[in-house]
Image: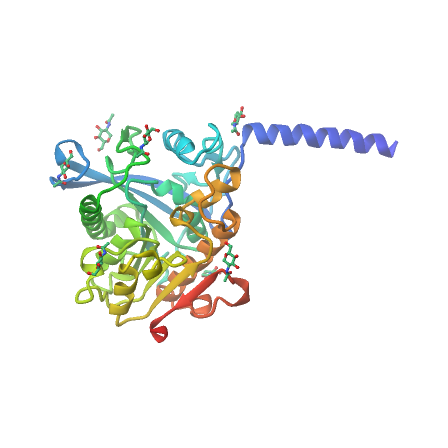
Amino acid sequence: MKRSIQNVSAALASVVAFFVSTTVGTEIPPPTGRYHIGRRKYDIPFLNTEDLFAPGNVSTSFIATVWYPTLQEPCEPATPYLDPAVAALWEPAADQTAGTLSNLTSHVQPGAPPAPAPRDGQAGLFPTLLFGPGGTGPPTEAYTILISELVSRGYVVAGLDHPYEQPFVRYPNGTGVYGPPVNYTLSSEEANLLYEMRIKDNVHFVGVWPDLVAELDAPWATAKLGAFGHSIGGAAAAGTARLIARETLASTLNMDGTFLDATNDSATADIHRPTMLLGQDGHDADDGDLSWEIFPAAQTGWWRTMFVNGTAHLDFSDWTFWKTLGGKPLGTIDGARMVDVTREFVTAFFNYTILGQEEGVLTSPGPVWPEVSVYDGSDE
Ligand SMILES: *[C@@H]1O[C@H](CO)[C@@H](O)[C@H](O)[C@H]1NC(C)=O
Ligand SMILES: *[C@@H]1O[C@H](CO)[C@@H](O)[C@H](O)[C@H]1NC(C)=O
Ligand SMILES: *[C@@H]1O[C@H](CO)[C@@H](O)[C@H](O)[C@H]1NC(C)=O
Ligand SMILES: *[C@@H]1O[C@H](CO)[C@@H](O)[C@H](O)[C@H]1NC(C)=O
Ligand SMILES: *[C@@H]1O[C@H](CO)[C@@H](O)[C@H](O)[C@H]1NC(C)=O
Ligand SMILES: *[C@@H]1O[C@H](CO)[C@@H](O)[C@H](O)[C@H]1NC(C)=O
Ligand SMILES: *[C@@H]1O[C@H](CO)[C@@H](O)[C@H](O)[C@H]1NC(C)=O
């Protein structure tokens, strides 16, 4: 009798499992903090008549995707993780079977109501971080795993995507725009132009952010911002700091991006505020990138360089999780582990530089993070 009940419940369980896997799909690693994740997209008007990629070199706006804490519980079914057009471009590029990325889901909630002002945080506001993705892709949504974690810990993150520069972006009104192919390789001249364009976008966005926040009446910080990014987006975070007062932009973090132009010149690279470099092992001189020696050496403020053993350039995006599903291997580090590493060290950096928490792992990763090595001014 007992046995047959077990058989019935086992059969029921497999029906439920089948139902869940076909209607909901595989979820990306969920965030671990206390807040749920809201997301809204904005078209930010901004005339650029020297746009590297836009038709006729003229662009009139860029896209800001704002991710923010919400108290609203996510409902089933979960939302698709990537825009279908983005997934379709990166599945072949990542050597993934068609459907692998487009089937993934997240619990990001488009349009959810923003959480009310936090009791802790920065003067009763959620601190805001600016994010820049890699040059010519992947776009901000391919950093959902890291961004969601920061938001779940009480940060607002504004990711900026530049139409025509990214292989694909979708405006808030639903219109999609294709740019260069996913495997496009920037010349060094183009990389410099793109870097300047990103800095212009960042500076403009920081200028209009207070108006946007006032319009939304959201409890989001408009001063003491942090900026971070991957590749050119990370370099542009540091480059932006040169143009914006420390009171407005308090700290920057560059994930594996080569510093360019003034941030790669010892006379002008000092940004006079805390800064961190988080990159693949040997990104500095071993890898032939002198900028990772020139930039930190020029800093008069707090800085850290952290190398993560076994990583490649794209392990600093969600691609590191994609590799757990097959496809291109990137670095040898386990993708699930790399998700934890990036989440921990990026959060710790902004907790320290924006919220004034202890340095913790930024000074001593300890036996918990054996793959991370740390350098600061005392190691020169
Ligand atoms: C204008 O666009 C062309 C490609 O259409 C590009 O080669 C050129 O560098 C762009 N000019 C500027 C100033 O970005
Ligand atoms: C994606 O989901 C569809 C519909 O559930 C399914 O038929 C397909 O096998 C899935 N593809 C992959 C690669 O998971
Ligand atoms: C959507 O917005 C973009 C950017 O502002 C604009 O270029 C495009 O024409 C709009 N599409 C529609 C259908 O209104
Ligand atoms: C880029 O991808 C396209 C389409 O898959 C391919 O035809 C082309 O050869 C690739 N270019 C490079 C430089 O890999
Ligand atoms: C950074 O500056 C060094 C020294 O001037 C130079 O050798 C190197 O090529 C520069 N790197 C880049 C990416 O411009
Ligand atoms: C960062 O601060 C948040 C909020 O206080 C906390 O939940 C989280 O554990 C901290 N993370 C790290 C890595 O310090
Ligand atoms: C770095 O990773 C390699 C494998 O990729 C491993 O053999 C080596 O022991 C690691 N080194 C450290 C310091 O963790």
Q: Can the viewer see residue 53?
A: yes
Extreme residue toward the bottom, this view: 378
Nearer to the camera, 341 or 32:
341
Is 304 above or below relative to 206? Answer: below
What's the image's color scheme? rainbow
Q: How far from the left and from the top, in percent, is residue 220?
A: 33, 54
Is 297 above or below relative to 48? Answer: below
Number of labels in the image equals 0
Q: Can the viewer see residue 33?
A: no
Q: Quadrant of residue 256?
A: bottom left
Q: How far from the left and from the top, in percent, is residue 28?
A: 50, 41
Residue drawn at the location 14% of the way across and 41% of the way down: 48
Residue drawn at the location 32% of the way across and 35% of the way down: 182
Q: How far from the left and from the top, in percent, is residue 5?
A: 82, 31
Nearer to the camera, 149 or 209:
149
Nearer to the camera, 43 or 73:
43
Q: Where, quadrant-wise, is the N terminus in this rendering? A: top right
- Could you tell whether 368 is left or right of 351 in the image? right
Q: How far from the left and from the top, in percent, is residue 61?
A: 20, 38
Residue drawn at the location 23% of the way across and 52% of the way down: 206
Residue drawn at the location 79% of the way across and 30% of the way down: 7
Extreme residue toward the right, this view: 1
Q: Quadrant of residue 91?
A: top left
Q: Where, quadrant-wise, is the C terminus in this rendering? A: bottom left
